[in-house]
Amino acid sequence: MSDSDSFADDPERVALLREVAEDIRGQSSESEQLAAMLYRVSDLYDADEETTPAEIYRNVRNILDIKERGGLPERD
């Protein structure tokens, strides 16, 4: 059994996590980070995505590392 096998497809959970992410996105740099993390976690429950908790952990760790280094350059 792989890590992703323990997370059943759940379109309602995907929609809820992504809706929350959209609601908080853009309010601050911290909310941008949290929104990105919520999107990554929602991928665990999305039948169209192939990811594992370990991959999400690495991605979230990268998001936090970028924040620690001062963030990404401003977008146009």
Image: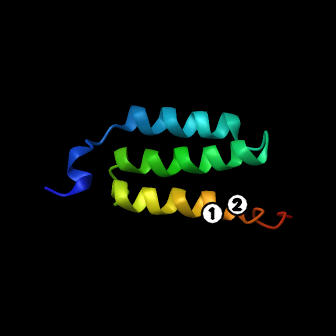
The colour scheme used to paint the residues is rainbow
Q: Quadrant of residue 14?
A: top left
> Which residue is painted at 70% across and 48% down in the image?
32
Residue topped by disc 2? 68
Q: Amino acid at mark 2?
A: Glu
Q: Is residue 42 left or right of residue 48?
A: right
Q: Amino acid at mark 1?
A: Asp
- Residue 28 at x, y = what percent? 79, 43
- Residue 74 at x, y = what percent? 84, 63
Q: CA distance from mark 2 to mark 1?
A: 5 Å
Q: Nearer the viewer, residue 42 or 60?
A: 60
> Which residue is painted at 53% across and 56% down in the image?
60
Disc 1 secondary structure class = helix
Neighbour tally class for label 2: few under 14, some 14-19, many 20 plus, Cα within 10 Å = few
Neighbour tally class for label 1: few under 14, some 14-19, many 20 plus, Cα within 10 Å = few
Q: Are marks 2 and 1 in contact (CB under 8 Å)?
A: yes
Image quadrant containing the N terminus: bottom left
Residue topped by disc 1? 65
Q: Which mark is residue 43?
A: none
Q: Is residue 26 left or right of residue 8?
A: right
- Residue 42 at x, y = what percent? 45, 45
Disc 2 secondary structure class = helix
> Which residue is painted at 62% across and 57% down in the image?
64
> Which residue is painted at 61% across and 40% down in the image?
21
Q: Quadrant of residue 56?
A: bottom left
Up the image or down, 24 lies above or below 29; here it is above
